[in-house]
Image (tube, helix red, strand yellow):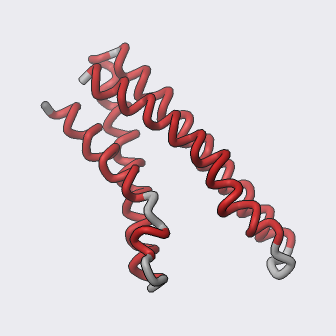
Amino acid sequence: MTTAMIVLGVLSILLTGVHAFGGGKEVLEPVMALSGPAPVPRETMRVCWHGITVVLLVSGVGFLWAASNAEQGVGAARLLSTINLGFAGLFLWTAWRSRIPGGWLKLGQWIAFLPMGVAGWAATLL
């Protein structure tokens, strides 16, 4: 489990950077620039965006902690893996529901979250 948790921790921290710096420019900034949404929904979107940044960073640190605390870390690793599976499910559902052409790739964050959730659970069960 230790090696898998280290890999998942590093990947989650890298994903945090991609989300904060790459995704912010591609998704958050264009939404913030729209004049249509009222200030409260627009600023709520900003809070949600940065909340996800926090979850991703805590996930990375949590996986690394689980690697160094094998017995106690199993529960944390399973919780973090379940959160990753939840994010994957949200992106898959949204891609399907939105009917955006090519949505499976345009909303392709599930491609990162699904393997992390599966690998995390697998590492705690094997």
Residue at point 44%, 56% (across, down): 87
Above or below, 81 against 27 in this view is above
Q: Is residue 101 left or right of residue 71?
A: right
Say which quadrant the C terminus sits in.
Answer: top left
Most extreme residue toward the top is: 68
Above or below, 67 against 4 in this view is above
Res. 80 image quadrant: top left
Residue at point 43%, 78% (across, down): 102
Q: Is residue 31 left or right of residue 88?
A: right
Residue 74 on image: x %, y %? 29, 27
Res. 8 image quadrant: top left
Residue 124 on image: x %, y %? 22, 31
Residue at point 20%, 38% (across, down): 122
Residue 50 on image: x %, y %? 68, 49
Res. 121 image quadrant: top left
Report the number of numbered marks: 0
Most extreme residue toward the left is: 126
Above or below, 85 against 120 in this view is below
Residue at point 29%, 17% (across, down): 70
Residue 112 on image: x %, y %? 40, 50
Near-viewer residue (73 or 34)? 34
Say which quadrant the N terminus sits in.
Answer: top left
